[in-house]
Amino acid sequence: ASLTACAMAVDRSKFRTCGQTSFCRRHRGQHSARLYNYKLDKDSVHFHVPSHEKEGEVAKETKDQKGGLWSSLSKRILGTTENEIDPYLRGPEPTLTGTLVNTVPASETSTNQKEKLQWSLYALNDGLLRMRVTEVYSNERESPYSKARVTYDELVLEAENLSPAHHAEWIRSDTKEQKFVDLLNKMVPEGDDKQNYMALQYGDSEDDTMVLLVRLETFAVYLYRENNIQAGPVLTLGASDMMHFEIRRRHPDEEAFEEEDFESADEEAKEEPKEEKEIVGYWEDGLAIYADGTREEKKVVEEDHRKLTEEEEAQLDREGLWEEKFQSHQDSKPNGPMSVGMDVQFPFSTHIFGLPEHASSTQLKATMGEGAHYQEPYRLYNLDVFEYELDETMALYGHVPLIVSHSQETGTSGVFWFNPTETYVDVIEGATDRDGTLTHWISESGVIDVFLLPGSSSQELYHQYSLLTGKMPLPPMFSLGYHQCRWNYKDEQDVYQVHDKFEELDYPYDVLWLDIEHTDGKRYFTWDNNLFPNPEKMQLKLWEQGRRM
């Protein structure tokens, strides 16, 4: 029995853990918290009055610009875009903008310089709220921020569904309007300086008005329903001081590298170029198959099961800042580490759901703290996984960075963390019911771009989410039937035998699948002419008998 268990065990060395990932190891558990303390510069905040006269024109332009993958790639390659500063951004203009300043002394930051970030807030239709934090982009070529970080609005967001909220009001701490004074008094914690707060009131009607309370220092935001202020915030971001943003930087040895490059340029020019072999396919392990019949040799590398020592816990973990590797994969970082992260709290909620795809329970379980069910955070990273364990946080085939919360006090709400890079999410149970559940999001790169979905019912929340990423089209009737699939049907004869057997047994099925081995060298949209010489005829035979392939 023990031999069987060993044979069937999952090879965990193929699944990277937080401890083997520099950006996660560096920021999990607030290890780097002393390097980041953000303040929203009060004088930098600017309110942009929504223009509903041009709303229809903006929506039309956005829809016309949406052209799918090819359109996106051509614009990125050719540089044709309306927004010169951030060509990847789509959707309405921001409602509030300002500058976030890292108040940690420059000599103590990870970059040894004063760090500033661009903060943008978007009050949108149907109660949606978008908060975006980026580097302060510049048109200066010499600046490390002359190019915006790549994001994927065009490929993911249904930007034509988004429009400014019907009304938005910026509430400053020095407001004289009594209704706004009363509103701030209800939200600002007793004993706190009201001068350290401002708010944004927005909505499409008086019945669904939301209010976002902004704490300037230390920066945090609290989302309330105006008709239920007394219940407390629906969502809270940044209040647990877990926000970080690793800005791009120059390598400390860059000048020395440049001198070496000049000295060795002539020698490199004299070197004869190495002949590159033609690749005709790939094996299941990802290694190349060459035209001369040989195959790529697997490089043996020492596995990294790094854990922080007690000494390293007391200081910044600098391993993997500029380069790191996992098994045969090596990652070079010419601009240094670029990870981002933030805490999102769901007050009064002990039941949160989401973060598919994981082989774990529907309700998300704690990954940190006393009595945590898991020791590893939920990993969001798409993998072609052959074997996996149950009740684990390891990544699987796909991921959706969405969490939905249910609370009797504040209703249903959720967050969509719009960052497709490798991400780890910790779930921490609050000490009291009021604390609810805390989540900590840590992404390898990109920007902080988070959508707040206020609900307040499940139906309203998923409507809000569908505005962001679209609705699934009605599936064709045949797709709802039985699908016959295995890895793999080796040739046409094999396909016909399986099909005929179903007919013989009068067993209904609607779809027969082929795996990647039907292709020429695992290249999509090709056929292996030796194994499948008549693919069109084969598919027509199945079609004539009511089957699809």
Image (cartoon, helix red, strand yellow):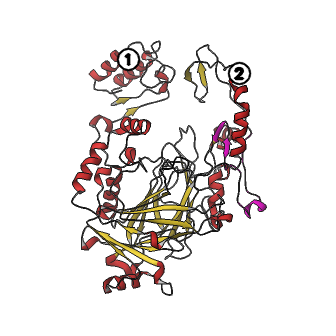
Please tell me whether residue 126 belongs to the stretch shown in magenta.
no
Give the residue displayed 27% in from the left and 47% down from the top. 61
Q: Which mark is residue 535?
A: 1
The answer to whether residue 142 is left or right of residue 326 is left
Q: Is residue 399 above or below residue 365?
A: above
| C-alpha distance separating marks 2 and 1 | 51 Å
Residue occupying the point 65% across, 62% down: 109
Of residue 490 and residue 436, the one placed in the foreground of this image is 436
Write down the residue under mark 2.
270
Viewer-side residue, 208 vs 426: 208
Question: Label 1: few (<14), some or many (≥20) within 10 Å?
Answer: some
> Badge 2, how many Cα within 10 Å: few under 14, some, many 20+?
few
In the image, residue 169 lies at what x, y percent? 32, 73
Instruction: Please identify the dominant SS of the magenta region.
Output: loop
The boundaries of the magenta stretch are 302-331
What percent of the width, then of the height, locates residue 80?
Answer: 38, 40
Is residue 10 visible in the rendered image? The answer is no
Q: Is residue 179 left or right of residue 249?
A: left
Q: Quadrant of the C terminus?
A: top left
Q: Quadrant of the N terminus?
A: top right
Dot 2: element: helix
Q: Amino acid at mark 2?
A: Lys
Residue 232 placement, left or right of 100: left
